[in-house]
């Protein structure tokens, strides 16, 4: 039975590390926007989750607001996956008989589930607002298309 828990824990660690690697390699966040600095002082803003399409290329000083909002979206995503990983770990801990508290384990699972759901609703609504603000700024940079 203990080997089964070790395998689950190893799978959890591998999934967690894969998510961190994926986020780092693809510049992933829930808004879908990312940016890249270039040596000539230009900034390229890209849109897309896996396949990035260039939205606009502009001098860096003109896109400071967009950079701030995209950085904020990146920070939200980093907090989101860390909190979700911790809550999933607590849910797994509560789900297995030998690892869970003897009393009130259903309450723990219910509480963790409610916290996770509430957190995800908050993050998604925040990301929608950020996405709209970024799109407005990019449209203004493009000249009001």
Image: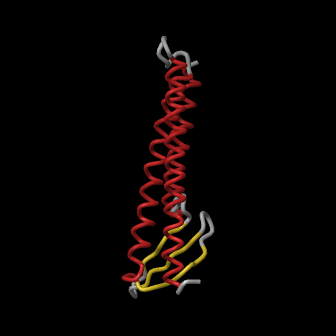
Picture residue at 51% right of the left edge, 37% below the top: 116
Q: How is the image coloured?
A: secondary structure
Whole-percent x and y of residue 118? 51, 40
Q: Is residue 18 above or below residue 10?
A: below
The answer to whether 55 appears left or right of 38 in the picture is right
Q: Is residue 14 above or below residue 1?
A: below
- Of the 4 image quadrants, the one containing the C terminus is bottom right
Whole-percent x and y of residue 16? 51, 44
Picture residue at 46% right of the left edge, 60% below the top: 73
Q: Relative to the observer, which residue lies in front, 129 or 110? A: 129
Picture residue at 54% right of the left edge, 49% below the top: 18
Whole-percent x and y of residue 133? 49, 68
Q: Is residue 49 above or below residue 85?
A: below
Picture residue at 49% right of the left edge, 15% below the top: 104
- Of the 4 image quadrants, the one containing the N terminus is top right
Q: Relative to the observer, which residue lies in front, 142 or 81? A: 142
Q: Is residue 28 above or below residue 65?
A: above
Q: Relative to the observer, which residue lies in front, 10 or 72? A: 72
Whole-percent x and y of residue 45? 50, 76
């Amino acid at each position: 039975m203990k080997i089964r828990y070790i395998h689950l824990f190893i799978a959890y660690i591998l999934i967690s590390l894969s998510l961190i690697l994926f986020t780092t390699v693809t510049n992933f966040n829930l808004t879908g926007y990312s940016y890249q600095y270039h040596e000539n002082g230009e900034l390229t803003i890209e849109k897309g989750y896996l396949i990035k399409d260039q939205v606009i290329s502009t001098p860096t000083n003109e896109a400071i607001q967009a950079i701030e909002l995209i950085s904020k979206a990146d920070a939200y995503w980093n907090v989101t996956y860390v909190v979700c990983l911790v809550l999933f770990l607590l849910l797994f801990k509560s789900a297995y008989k030998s690892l869970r508290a003897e009393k009130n384990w259903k309450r723990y699972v219910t509480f963790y589930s409610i916290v996770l759901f509430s957190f995800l609703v908050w993050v998604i609504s925040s990301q929608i607002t950020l996405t709209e603000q970024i799109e407005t700024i990019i449209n203004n940079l493009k000249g009001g298309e």
